[in-house]
Amino acid sequence: MPDEPSTKNTERQDLTRSMARSHRIASQRNTVSEEPSKAIYLSRLGRLAVGLISSLNMSNDKANNTTATAAGNEHEQSGLARPTNIPNSILPPSEWLSAYNKILDRHPLRTKMITSAVVSAFGSALGSYLSQTSPRKPGKRTESVFSNINWTDVLSYAIHGGLINAPISHYWFEWLSANGPSSNTASVLVDQLVVQPPLLVLMFVCLDIFRANIRATINQFREARVISNALENAGPAVVASWRFWPFAVYLTFKYLKKKHYTVALNLCSVAWTVYLSRRSPQVSK
């Protein structure tokens, strides 16, 4: 009869072997089952990423198409479609008008004065050119376009339009719109019968004054040899100014406050003006 302890040891070893075999088989099954599950998970994750990227691209394309379509519809509705062959620096006339309206709203009086001066000068130049242009005779030399223009009249009309007519018209029409008749016909009658005649008289008086002063200035400018005399006197005057003004300006900056600079230099200019008056040539009467 075998020994009882040895039999128990044998049974224990067999049980241990069987348990180890069972564990190896179970672990192999788990490994085999985990590998397909990881592969499936990675494939699903990849498909999800591709789907997200595709959806983002589609949404961007739709947004770009929507923006382009909206811009095209806006240009078509407003009639401001810009031709493709026009550079960006060249604006269509409609945008010029829009920019002018913005400036007019921001600076009404200044804009009207500049506009009136330019338009009045252009009208005077055009009228002067058309009135003095005659059919060219055979063999006669062609004159320049600018030689047929009376530039004294052009400057006179520009001054009158910018400095006199524009401010008066601006404030008059503002007052007429606020306090005048409600009827447009009545407003026109008031403007033409009450205001327009005095304005025409004032215009002719101002134009004659401007013409006379411009012609006198031009003649005096020519007779007095203004440019040649200025060039002759400029050299000695500059040298003399370097002997006086640097010290005056330096002392002003060093000892006075900023708010007193102009007053101090004006007082210094009294001495400078006396010097220039004493050395300038006397005009014989």
Image (cartoon, rainbow, N blue to C red):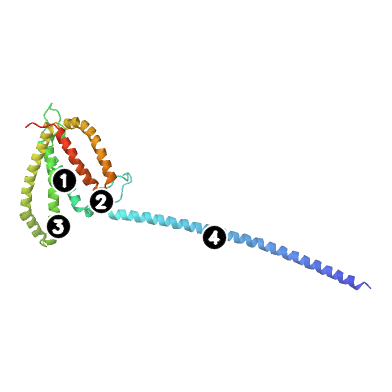
- Residue 48: image tag: 4
Amino acid type at circle 4 is Leu
Q: Earlier in the sequence, mark 1 or mark 4?
A: 4
Question: Quadrant location of residue 16?
Answer: bottom right
- Residue beneath disc 1: 117
Circle 2 SS class: helix
> Extreme top residue here?
139
> Rounded to the nearest whole Å, what is the CA distance between mark 1 and mark 3?
20 Å
Using the image as rendered, state which of residue 75 and residue 172 is in the foreground. 172
Q: Are marks 2 and 3 in contact (CB under 8 Å)?
A: no
- Residue beneath disc 2: 99
- Residue beneath disc 3: 174
Amino acid type at circle 3 is Glu
> Rounded to the nearest whole Å, what is the CA distance between mark 1 and mark 2?
19 Å
Neighbours of disc 2 within 10 Å: few (<14), some (14-19), many (20+): few
- Residue 32, image x, y percentages: 69, 62
Q: Earlier in the sequence, mark 1 or mark 3?
A: 1
Q: Earlier in the sequence, mark 2 or mark 3?
A: 2
Using the image as rendered, state which of residue 279 and residue 12 is in the foreground. 279
Circle 1 SS class: helix
Question: Quadrant location of residue 34?
Answer: bottom right
> Rounded to the nearest whole Å, what is the CA distance between mark 2 and mark 3?
22 Å
Using the image as rendered, state which of residue 36 and residue 167 is in the foreground. 167
> Rounded to the nearest whole Å, what is the CA distance between mark 4 and mark 3?
70 Å
Taking the spot 19% from the left edge, 50% from the top edge, the residue there is 110
Question: Quadrant location of residue 205?
Answer: top left
